[in-house]
Amino acid sequence: MSRITLRVNRRSYDLDCAASTMLVDALRDQLRLTGTHVGCDTSQCGACTVLVDGRSIKSCTMLAAEAVGVEITTIEGVADGERLHPMQTAFIEQHGLQCGFCTPGMVLSSIDLCSRTARPSEHEVRNWLEGNLCRCTGYHNIVKAVMAGAEGTQKASKP
């Protein structure tokens, strides 16, 4: 076991981790941030997506020790207090979720997309979300949610 410090959702945490501990397991099992889901353990589904220095990554592909020195954002750290992030609001308003299992990964991946492309096209959204699987709902409402969330993000960032 090694002692590592992770910066998650703007707070620092000291953890004891085996060298083989995956980031997803450290987040869920040690920090109890269970919005990061384990869906496949093979980086196929995207349910474990988090932001690392603002970029979406599948946390089942990263060792916890590799995350030392970076800022990790989970779905629990996206809202501003009680005020949801515009992307979270858009997923609710556009009915872009059903069971919610894939939703945290979808939301975080979509936030990354919108940080790179302010107003992504439907094609860009569909292409970007290829690595995030949903088994409950059709992707039509998810795509609508991402596009609405992009608009909300742009409005929220203007002074």
Image: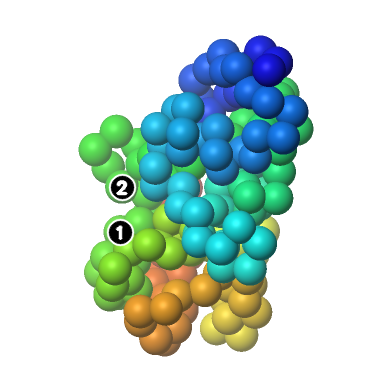
Can residue 20 be seen at all in this image of the molecule?
yes
Q: Is residue 55 left or right of residue 133?
A: right
Q: Is residue 88 left or right of residue 20?
A: left
Q: Is residue 103 above or below residue 4?
A: below
Q: Is residue 6 above or below residue 143?
A: above
Residue 155, percent from left and from top: 41, 56
Q: Locate residue 109: give its quadrant.
A: bottom right
Q: Is residue 121 left or right of residue 70?
A: left
Q: Is residue 130 left or right of residue 85?
A: right
Residue located 66% across and 62% down the image: 42
User: Between residues 146 and 47, which one lies in front from this camera angle?
Assistant: 47
Residue 38, percent from left and from top: 50, 54
> Would you call the spot at circle 2 few (<14 residues within 10 Å), some (14-19), or many (20 or more)?
few
Residue located 71% across and 43% down the image: 62
Total count of labels = 2
Q: Secondary structure at mark 1?
A: helix
Q: Are marks 1 and 2 in contact (CB under 8 Å)?
A: yes
Q: Between marks 1 and 2, how big is the CA–CA gap?
A: 6 Å
The residue that mark 2 highlights is 84
Q: Is residue 29 above or below residue 15?
A: below
User: Between residues 136 and 145, which one lies in front from this camera angle?
Assistant: 136
Mark 1 or mark 2: which comes first in sequence?
2
Q: Which mark is residue 141?
A: none
User: Between residues 107 and 100, which one lies in front from this camera angle?
Assistant: 100
The residue that mark 1 highlights is 89
> Would you call the spot at circle 1 few (<14 residues within 10 Å), some (14-19), or many (20 or more)?
some
Residue located 56% across and 43% down the image: 24
Q: Secondary structure at mark 2?
A: loop
Q: Amino acid at mark 2?
A: Leu
Q: Is residue 153 above or below residue 59?
A: below
Q: Amino acid at mark 1?
A: Thr
